Image: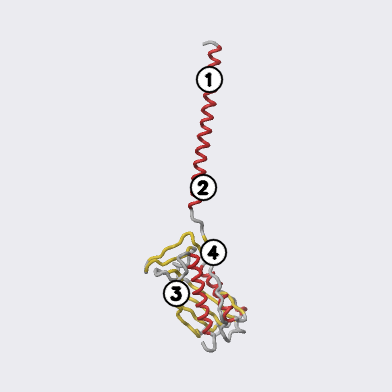
């Protein structure tokens, strides 16, 4: 083979290699573009998580009571384990629950319930001070309010139910001076979780009103 022939063959090989490399880069760019588009589409279709808290519901009228100079202690507030979770729970049947995986509590349900109940009681009773359970002996608690929740979720009939046993305890003697079962329902504006949580807040305000009336001289 002549030198010229070898030169032509070498040039041809170089050209083929460059062409193959160019084709490889084009294919790689196309694959990357497809992957990027798929990831972008997936990100658009995945539902975004929403986070909720209960809110204070103001009373239209303050409840006359004898606790103006007293210290109230709120807690413990207990929940069944099926409600003690991050997701909003909906009851779909007598023995069946549904968890809204993307609708979550921003804080534990017992914590947001206790905090808002304290605000509601402060608004209705105006005591000297309210302490959250657990407290120490220096806090000087006079009356302890405990709540044992059985139901606090949306129901199959599309209402929201709060079913709870509450007690008022003379903290000094440990005697239960008042105990009652609160069981009420409210129909939310829609099935959306925001409206369900709003209805839960309204029910908690009604519970606070019922407890406050127990402190009234006419309660």
Q: Nearer the viewer, mark 2 or mark 4?
A: 2
Kindly identify which numbered label has been placed on residue 185.
3
What secondary structure is marked by label 4? Answer: loop
x, y percent for residue 74: 55, 77
What secondary structure is marked by label 3? Answer: strand
Tell me how the rendering is colored: secondary structure
Q: Which residue is nearer to you in this view: 46 or 17?
A: 46
What secondary structure is marked by label 1? Answer: helix
Pointer 2: what residue? 40
Kindly identify which numbered label has been placed on residue 113.
none
Q: Is residue 1 above or below residue 78?
A: above
- Separation of residues labelled 1 and 4 (CA atoms): 67 Å
Residue extending farthest to the left is 94
Could you tell which of marks 1 and 4 lies nearer the N-terminus?
1
Could you tell which of marks 2 and 1 lies nearer the N-terminus?
1
Kindly identify which numbered label has been placed on residue 12.
1
Mark 1 burial class by Cα count in 10 Å: few <14, some 14-19, many 20+: few
Pointer 4: what residue? 106
- Separation of residues labelled 4 and 3 (CA atoms): 24 Å
Residue extending farthest to the front is 189
Q: Which residue is nearer to you in this view: 36 or 6?
A: 36
Q: Is residue 53 above or below residue 64?
A: above
Q: Which residue is nearer to you in this view: 157 or 134?
A: 157
Q: Is residue 201 left or right of residue 155?
A: right
Could you tell which of marks 4 and 3 lies nearer the N-terminus?
4
- Separation of residues labelled 2 and 4 (CA atoms): 27 Å
- Separation of residues labelled 3 and 2 (CA atoms): 43 Å
Mark 2 burial class by Cα count in 10 Å: few <14, some 14-19, many 20+: few
What secondary structure is marked by label 2? Answer: helix
x, y percent for residue 182: 46, 78
């Amino acid at each position: 083979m002549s030198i010229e022939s070898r030169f032509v063959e070498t040039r041809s090989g170089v050209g083929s290699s460059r062409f193959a490399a160019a084709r490889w880069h084009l294919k790689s760019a196309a694959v990357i573009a497809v992957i990027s588009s798929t990831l972008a589409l997936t990100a658009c279709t995945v539902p975004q998580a929403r986070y909720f808290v209960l809110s204070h519901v103001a009373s239209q009228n303050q409840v006359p009571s004898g606790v103006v100079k007293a210290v109230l202690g709120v807690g413990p507030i207990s929940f069944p384990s099926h409600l003690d979770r991050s997701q909003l729970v909906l009851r779909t049947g007598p023995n069946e629950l549904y968890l809204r995986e993307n609708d979550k509590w921003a804080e534990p349900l017992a914590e947001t319930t206790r905090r808002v109940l304290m605000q509601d009681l402060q608004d209705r009773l105006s005591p000297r001070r309210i302490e959250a359970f657990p407290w120490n002996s220096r806090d000087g608690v006079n009356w302890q309010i405990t709540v044992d929740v059985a139901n606090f979720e949306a129901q199959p009939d599309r209402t929201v139910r709060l079913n709870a046993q509450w007690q008022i305890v003379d903290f000094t003697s440990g005697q239960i001076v008042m105990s009652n079962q609160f069981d009420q329902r409210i129909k939310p504006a829609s099935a959306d979780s925001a409206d369900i949580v709003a209805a839960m807040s309204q029910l908690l305000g009604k519970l606070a009103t019922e407890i406050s009336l127990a402190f009234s001289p006419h309660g």
